[in-house]
Amino acid sequence: MNALAHAAVRISALVVAGSLLMLAATGPGTAERIITIVSLTAGLLVAVATIVLSRYGRQALALIRRDKTDRSSRRTVSPQEEQ
């Protein structure tokens, strides 16, 4: 993962950890509990999206690089050489 993905995962982990701590400290049915649950959900979504996109991006880059090396190893034949 690149530095931006690492930062996003770390920040979302901080939000999730803080939300879990606040979840135990807030009473049920209060506005604080609702905000805590929203923060927890957002932190989890950002973490999962970052990890999934990072993995998908790495695989896509590997496919692109492999495709470029395959193309460069093939020899193209010009119309003059075919005759």
Image: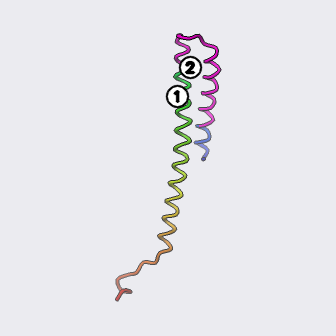
- Give neighbour class at mark 1: few <14, some 14-19, many 20+ (Cα, 10 Å): some
Q: What secondary structure is marked by label 1?
A: helix
| Mark with earlier residue (2, 1) | 2
Identify the residue shown where x is 52% and y is 38%: 49
Q: What span is colored magenta in the figure?
A: 9-36
Q: Is 31 part of what is drawn in magenta? A: yes
Q: Is residue 44 above or below residue 75?
A: above
Give the dominant element type of the magenta stretch: helix, strand or loop. Answer: helix
Q: Position of residue 9 (x, y in %)?
A: 60, 37
Q: Which residue is mark 2?
A: 36
Q: Is residue 48 above or below residue 68?
A: above
Residue receiving disc 1: 42
Q: Who's the residue at 50% across and 74% down the image?
A: 73
Q: List x then y, in percent, for residue 16.
A: 60, 27
Q: Quadrant of residue 82?
A: bottom left
Secondary element at tag 2: helix
Foreground residue, 44 or 5?
44
Q: Amino acid at mark 2?
A: Thr
Residue drawn at x 55%, y 52% as measured from the top left:
58
